[in-house]
Image (cartoon, helix red, strand yellow):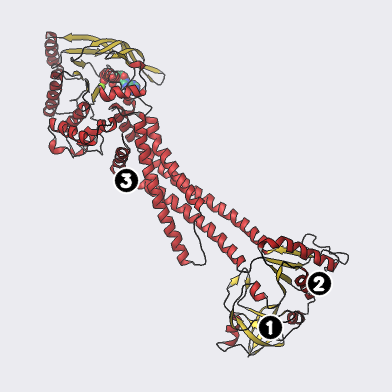
Amino acid sequence: MTLPELLRFALRGLTGHGLRTALSLLGVSIGIASVLVLTALGDGAKRYVVGQFQSLGTNLLIVLPGKTETSGSFGIGGVPNDLTLDDAEAIERFVPQARRVVPVSMGTEEVAYAGLSRQIAIVGTSPDYLKARQLRMASGEFLPADEFSRGAAVTVLGHKTARELFRGEDPVGKVVRIGGWRMRVIGVLARQGVKLMMDFDDVAVLPVATGMRMFNRPSLFRILVQVHAHTDLDLAKQRILDLLIERHDEEDVTVITQDAVVDTFSAILGTLTLFVTGIAAISLSVAGFGIMNVMLVSVSERTREIGLLKAVGVARRQILAAFVTEAAIISGFGGLLGLALGFALVHLGVRLYPVFEASPPVWAIAAAMAVSLGVGVVFGMLPAWRATKLDPVLALGRR
Amino acid sequence: MIHLAGICRTYQVGDQPVRALVDVDEEIREGEHVAIMGPSGSGKSTLLNVIGCLDRPTAGSYTLGGREVGGLDDSALTQVRRHEIGFVFQFFHLIPRLSAAENVELPMVFAGVPRRERRQRAAAAIAAVGLEERAAHLPEQLSGGERQRVAMARATIMRPALLLADEPTGNLDSKSGNAVLEMLDELSDNGLTLLVVTHNPKVAQRADRILFLVDGRIAKRVAGDQVGELVALLTEDD
Ligand SMILES: Nc1ncnc2c1ncn2[C@@H]1O[C@H](COP(=O)(O)OP(=O)(O)O)[C@@H](O)[C@H]1O
Ligand SMILES: [Mg+2]
């Protein structure tokens, strides 16, 4: 018996049992589609968060005052040394891997203009902040290139801050009051959206020295260090640590890589993906049971048919081949249908929520196809497997 | 052609053995036309199934054309069923989703007969049983008599030397029954070895010999002139 003959016979089997075929197809394709959609969701969530971190700048080291491991005891006095602008300058001078060194001091103050006011986050920093945090300008200039210690009375406003306070007026060149200080607005940031818990649309950015004076705090909030290449991170981290230990006479700072944070989140999200995949696997096996039921319901009918085939001299392996072909057609075709359905749904989802760049991972597609083929073939073949072992008269059944 | 020696077939129903055939010895020559009669449950179908290689005896020896059937493996049995034996069932056993012609073609499909030849032979066989018009019909669209004619065409399409029919007219009215019987007679006249299980003395009358089964044993063998006498006796009983 040739392959085309086999296919023809199997197809007659499928078209001859329209309802059963349709139900099996439905079972397989829903299973596959749900695997695709669910894993795409998990994967999309992961990409989203990783993307958020990357939008905050790459190859970044963050220097924090205080040592996280030994909570409670800092040196003899129990209080860490301040993280100062001099520290930042030292890093800039002595750590060759550092491409940008950006001191940051943070606070919250009231920003007022013409009777309107907002309580917002104030960031005191240096001009390189713009590049290190990958921010863009809407109008005007960012902070002037100065030495860290020169604190001009200028500010750059976030997109929303400018909109709310100025109501359509051009803020550049106007004077606002920040915590009672008069500051000239020199620029407005472009709309950034919320980047990982920090709202860059509702801020006022000022020179770091100005900020430190305004908040009356001797220590920086942190120092961002952007290195030239990803491979520089570890070395730079060590150098910075060594340098600051030498300057402070003790280890009272923490240096973390932003990538480490990303990695942690990735791991969490990997778990999420795994979880989602678990759900997918369950949905796939539910679909599998569906197929199995549909296949098994017809066992008595099919057993009689197999008995007849044996009685007219069809060989066991021919019968098995016919049934495997039939099952493979169902699950293969159902699988393709499911892929189409799944991709369509994912595509639709991405259309509706463009920030969510979801796509089903290749391994999930492969696994889904493998399982559906496997389940389909095994359970499609099971009745044949058992029935072909019977003597024809038993398979034919008594009436 | 067929040689049975000490054939037993015991079914196990729970822990109760049911002895469907007990020590059956019989010799059937090539070209013979034999009827098998007996009360319901006497083992007629079981005997026919054993001879047709659809069932295996639990004891005894069965030789077909000089070969011991008990010694054949699955693929050899497949060949025997495919080429040497045709079987007609009381309940037709056509495949419902295949047309009349496709049902007739079925044994040839798996025997590897080329498509064109298959088509021609199936069409000829369908025509020979008077169903040209209905070749494309599904079994459910055919009457009982027509279905049994399709089944006859299927049973003979591989040109077997032995045709077995288990109550072939049992589910048919007398008119379609007669048509089937005439076809059987014709096959027998052409030299086919024919075994027919029947309850009907008029069917048995056409045979050269009658085997009479009771409780799984051949209780009586009737041949030649005695066939008519026995049949007359049985018919009076009715
Ligand atoms: N598959 C089976 N399982 C159990 N008992 C069976 C089976 N087939 C037949 N029998 C028993 O074997 C005996 C002979 O059956 P059968 O050959 O069908 O009789 P007949 O065809 O003469 O009516 C009966 O008692 C029947 O109940
Ligand atoms: Mg019977």
Q: Is residue B57 visible?
A: no
| On-image quarter of the C terminus of chain A | top left
Could you tell me the amino acid type at mark 2? Asp
Residues packed near mark 2 inside 10 Å, few (<14), some (14 to 19) or many (20 plus): some
Counting from the top left corner in percent of width and height, residue B180 is at 14, 26
Give above or below for A221 relative to B84.
below
Give above or below for A245 relative to A369.
below
User: Label 1, label 3: how many angstroms apart (C-alpha)?
Assistant: 75 Å
Pick the residue in front: A276 or B32: B32
Quadrant position of ligand 2:
top left
Counting from the top left corner in percent of width and height, residue B7 is at 32, 12
- Please report whichever mark, 1 or 3, sits nearer to the chain's N-terminal start: 3
Pick the residue in front: B87 or B236: B87
Q: Which mark is residue A19?
A: 3
Name the side, left or right, on which A382 lies relative to A363: left
Q: Which tag is nearer the camera, tag 1 or tag 3? A: 1
Q: Chain of mark 2?
A: A
- Please report whichever mark, 1 or 2, sits nearer to the chain's N-terminal start: 2
Question: Same subunit under labels 1 and 2?
Answer: yes
Q: Which residue lies under the disc numbered 1? A: A144
Q: Which residue lies under the disc numbered 2? A: A82
Could you tell me the amino acid type at mark 1? Pro
Question: Same subunit under labels 1 and 3?
Answer: yes
